[in-house]
Image: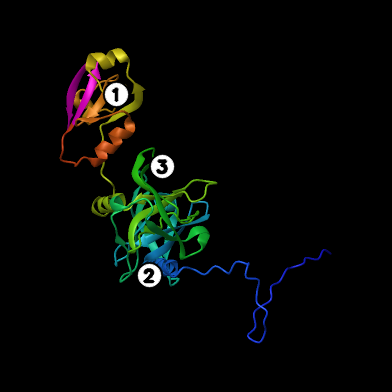
Amino acid sequence: MSHRTYRTWPVADKHSDRSPDRNQPAPLQPDAEDADLLDAYSRAVVHVVESVSPAVIAVTGEKNDRSAGSGSGFLITPDGYAVTNSHVVAGRARLTGETLDGDQIAAEVIGDDPSTDTALLRLAAGDLPYCQFGDSDALRVGQLVIAMGSPLGLHSTVSTGVVSAVRRSMRAQDGRLIDNVVQHAAPINPGSSGGPLVDSRGRVVGVNTAIIAYAQGLGFAVPSETVQWVTGELLAHGRVRRRQLGIVAANTRVARTVMREADLLADEAVAVAGIAPDSPAQRAGLREGDLIVALNDRLVCGVDDIHRLLTQLPVDVPIVLTVVREGVKSDVRLT
């Protein structure tokens, strides 16, 4: 057995002339201002947790093979409406929302939008605590955020971090891009999906949706502005209404000769590869091989641009496509 020798220093005694070696550094004492800041940080987190956690739920359900799965969610109205991720409820039956107090309440899916990984639930209860949404567009890099949920089945778990980046894009389950995704450093794990990401005032600024495997401090949340729009659509219509052109399309490069002939600004466009029968595209006279280069005077360089612009356009605004056919540029109006 090896023996370790520890060097010790004498402790000053009021009855002794001995004192510690004055060449040794004194123990570090926290600066008073730093201590105040730390206390303020702690107070902010504690206040948010105490005010928001009663509205955070664990979402569980069963698949057809009887295997159980779980995620997180949060209540947005006192009569039981709650938000979670689409992938949390996909293919699951007998959904249950478990509250902070351990009450297990039956839940049903009111609407589901895989394009934004957002789902709206309704718990069979009333007079419930609920969260308020904040403005995700106002988030700044470095801002404190708090993630709440039930990672790995550990209910009421809280983690903190900062906004690492804003306006990221992330591919959804159906291939569409989710825009303005919030990247943050609050640790999240499997089971955190669907839980709220809140700011220092306890307002929901995002819904935690994904992590990058084998990475640390890389979490992503669907922005609250998107979630509010989606839940509004789901409440009013049971689905998210999106305008459709009725085409099969692919990204393509534009030949330089075509760019010169049609006076194009970019060498990328969307090629029409197919047209659905009795679709807006067919009625407007679009043809296979047409190149879509703009939508309502907004430059189009890929299919993602079309999806984004169609989502942003109000339903009562006409759609005008700028297309190139056989080197000639023209506008096509769709209804």
The quadrant holding residue 280 is top left
Crowd band around label 1 with a 10 angstrom C-alpha radius: few (<14), some (14–19), many (20+): some
Nearer-N-terminus badge (3/2): 2
Q: Which marked residue is nearer to the observer: mark 3 or mark 1?
A: 1
Which type of secondary structure does the marked residue at label 3 adopt?
A: loop
Q: Nearer the viewer, mark 3 or mark 2?
A: 2
| Sequence-first tag of 1 and 2 | 2
Q: Nearer the viewer, residue 293 or 79?
A: 293
Quarter of the image where one finds residue 108: bottom left
Nearest the viewer among 327 and 48 is 48
Observer-nearest of 27 and 34? 27
Horizontal side, residue 159 vs residue 5: left or right:
left
Q: Quadrant of the N terminus?
A: bottom right
Label 3 crowd bin: few (<14), some (14–19), many (20+), radius 10 Å: some
20 left or right, relative to 50 = right
Q: Position of residue 89 (x, y in %)?
A: 42, 53
Task: Identify the image quadrant of the C terminus.
Answer: top left
Q: Earlier in the sequence, mark 3 or mark 1?
A: 3
Q: Position of residue 114 (x, y in %)?
A: 37, 45
Percent position of residue 147, x then y: 42, 59
CA distance separating discs 1 and 2:
51 Å
- The reply to whether callout 3 and callout 1 are in contact (CB within 8 Å) is no
Disc 3/disc 2 C-alpha distance (Å): 35 Å
In percent of the image, x 26 and y 35: which residue is there? 244
Q: CA distance from mark 3 to mark 1?
A: 29 Å
Residue occupied by mark 3:
173
Q: Which residues are magenta?
A: 320-335
Per the rendering, the mark at residue 47 is 2
Q: Amino acid at mark 2?
A: His
Chief SS of the magenta region = strand
Q: Which residue is mark 1?
A: 266
Q: What's under tag 3, amino acid-wise?
A: Gln
